[in-house]
Amino acid sequence: MKTNREEILQSALRLFMSMNYERVSLQMVTEAVGLTKTGIFNYYASKQELFVAVADRYLFNAQDPEKKYAACDGTLSDFIDKYIRGVAQTMEYIVRIGRVEGDAVTGKHINSAYINFFQQVLFYYPDGKRRLHELLKKEYCCWREAVRGAILSGEVREDVDPEEAAALFRQVFVGMSYEMSFFNGLEINVLERRFRYIYDLLKR
């Protein structure tokens, strides 16, 4: 059986989502993809190097605002639509990888397992705290610029604070993602409804 780098990364992601970094071994990865340890070393020299590659692919790249939705070049209403579509596509991507023959990641719902993976990045990814902070800051910046543009165009009220409005949208998303991860995962239709309610409060 021919194994490629993508199969290794996907198998490793499932393992890191299923259990903590300390419990995952390269042997587990080799068994999951049908390689020898030597075969894994042809791609990654250590478990940490593999973990970094997994985090880069399925967290920092997948969650990069530039990859999830288009730049803030339209109305705030359009930005909300793009953001929701981007979230839905990213969720579908992670859930698809997290499933093996129709079964979810062992012992956990995929969404909560993915959030646990974020926590691991804080501790086991070199400079992970700074990288995550930069990612979140980039998200806030996109929301802030979208709101600021809506104020300048007259789409929303002049007295709206772009920083506070950006935080409101972003924290509703994060809070819902966390809370719903313990059940069936984030409900996109509910997120859209909450965003639209906030938007209506901001409109002229």
Image (spheres, rainbow, N blue to C red):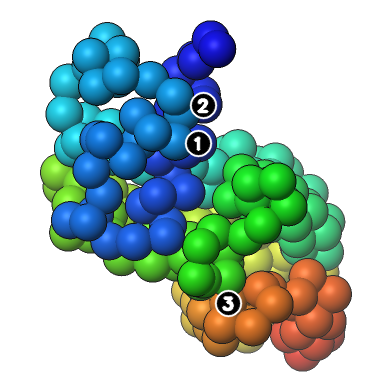
Q: Amino acid at mark 1?
A: Gln
Taking the image as shown, residue 171 lies to the left or right of residue 119, namely right
Q: Quadrant of the N terminus?
A: top right
The Cα–Cα distance between marks 1 and 2, rounded to whole angstroms, is 5 Å
Q: Amino acid at mark 3?
A: Ser
Q: Vertical placement of 120 versus 178: above or below?
A: above
The Cα–Cα distance between marks 3 and 2, rounded to whole angstroms, is 25 Å
Q: Secondary structure at mark 3?
A: helix
Q: Secondary structure at mark 1?
A: helix
Q: Do tag 1 and tag 2 residues touch (Cβ < 8 Å)?
A: yes
Q: Do tag 3 and tag 2 residues touch (Cβ < 8 Å)?
A: no
Q: Which residue is mark 2?
A: 7
Q: Secondary structure at mark 2?
A: helix
Q: Vertical placement of 96 versus 107: above or below?
A: above
Q: Which residue is mark 3?
A: 181
Upstream in the sequence, badge 3 or badge 2?
2
Indicate the quadrant where residue 168 lies: bottom right
- Residue 158, x across and y down, in percent: 67, 79
Q: Vertical placement of 111 versus 9: above or below?
A: below
Q: Nearer the viewer, mark 1 or mark 3?
A: 1
The Cα–Cα distance between marks 1 and 3, rounded to whole angstroms, is 20 Å
Indicate the quadrant where residue 151 lies: bottom right
- Residue 15, x across and y down, in percent: 40, 50
Q: Using the rendered image of the protein, determine whether residue 94 is visible from the camera's viewpoint.
A: no
Which residue is depicted at the point 70% across and 46% down? 101
Q: Amino acid at mark 2?
A: Glu
Local crowd size for mark 2, using a 10 Å CA cut-off: few (<14), some (14–19), many (≥20): some
Residue 10: which numbered mark, if any? Answer: 1
Q: Using the rendered image of the protein, determine whether residue 120 is visible from the camera's viewpoint.
A: yes
- Residue 139, x across and y down, in percent: 50, 57
